[in-house]
Amino acid sequence: MVRTLLVRGLLAGLLAGIVAGGFAFVFGEPHLDAAIALEEGAAAPAAAHVHDHEHGDEGALGRPVQKAGLFLATGLYGVAVGGVFALVFAGLRGRVGPRSDGGLALAAAGTAFGAIILVPFVKYPANPPAVGDPATIDQRTLLYVVMILVGLAATAVAVATGRRVTAGPWARWGMAAAAFLVPVVAAWVLLPGMDEVPEGFPATLLWEFRVASLGTQLVFWTAFGVLFGLLSDRAARRSAVAAVAG
């Protein structure tokens, strides 16, 4: 059964990655191009005309290659996420969440988006090129990983709390939400901020880049949850028909 779920996760992840790549290509790449143009314009010495010309040629050659590799990158990302998700799904199946495989897939995908993407994004949103000090990249990466771990831990605590509360559904959901928000909000407040947006950087471009970045992840996890859920429900119906026929 785990092998079947793994194949299903890899397939759904690949397809969702391609869909997310299409979204990123249409809505994210124009903002990335604009940010790169700002970075190159700010860094190019006015007197080095020849060097500027050569650098511009390299950038002109590099961006088409990067855009062509976008779908490969999002597809590989989807395959990796799909494999891990399938293994986690196998452990959750029949133990927590909705009883139907399709409902559990949607709930798990939504929870993963919240814990892995949304929680760290609120504290450390994505930045385009020309934003961020290269000297702090290790620190920023570590803080982002810490926020992901906080989101995952808070989700696990919330699920455990919801299962232990024996009161009505409102009390159960309220306690679970509190168990999730307390450590997350504490991390948001206690962890250091990393506001490295240079003075004069267009606020509209920064906002649109961040929205496109978050939107790409939202599209991926939505598509993945729907695809994995549909494949799971289809497999369950086939099993039920086979059991009745047998």
Image (cartoon, grey):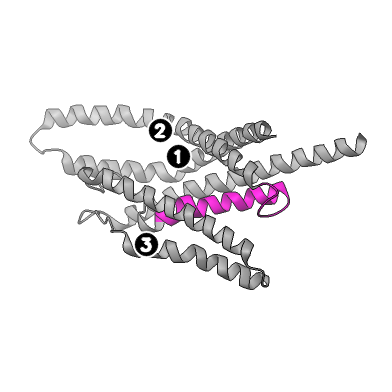
- For the N terminus, the image quarter is top right
For residue 133: magenta?
no
Across and down, in percent, residue 64 comes to 37, 30
Counting other residues with Cα less than 10 Å from the Cα at mark 2, is it few (<14), some (14-19), or many (20 or more)?
Answer: some
Q: Nearer the viewer, residue 83 or 92?
A: 92
Q: Which residue is mark 3?
A: 188
First in sequence: mark 1 vs mark 3: 1
Counting other residues with Cα less than 10 Å from the Cα at mark 1, is it few (<14), some (14-19), or many (20 or more)?
Answer: some
| Residue found farthest to the left | 47
Which SS class for mark 3?
helix
Residue drawn at the location 55% of the way across and 53% of the way down: 111
Instruction: Identify which amino acid the numbered label 1 is placed on.
Output: Phe
Please determine whether, in this image, residue 55 is positioned above or below residue 175: above
Q: Which residue is mark 2?
A: 67
Across and down, in percent, residue 159 comes to 58, 58
Instruction: Identify which amino acid the numbered label 3 is placed on.
Output: Trp
Q: Nearer the viewer, residue 48 or 219?
A: 219
- For the C terminus, the image quarter is top right
The circle on residue 181 is none
Instruction: Identify which amino acid the numbered label 2 is placed on.
Output: Lys
Q: Nearer the viewer, mark 1 or mark 3?
A: 3
Q: For the residues marked 2 and 3, what is the alpha-carbon distance in whole angstroms? A: 34 Å
First in sequence: mark 1 vs mark 2: 1
Q: Main secondary structure of the magenta part?
A: helix
Q: Which residues are magenta?
A: 93-121
Across and down, in percent, residue 20 comes to 51, 41
Is residue 163 visible to the viewer in this orientation of the structure?
yes
Residue drawn at the location 21% of the way across and 56% of the way down: 200
Residue drawn at the location 39% of the way across and 53% of the way down: 147
Is 84 on the left-hand or right-hand side of 200? right
Q: Which residue is mark 1?
A: 25
Residue drawn at the location 81% of the way across and 37% of the way down: 238
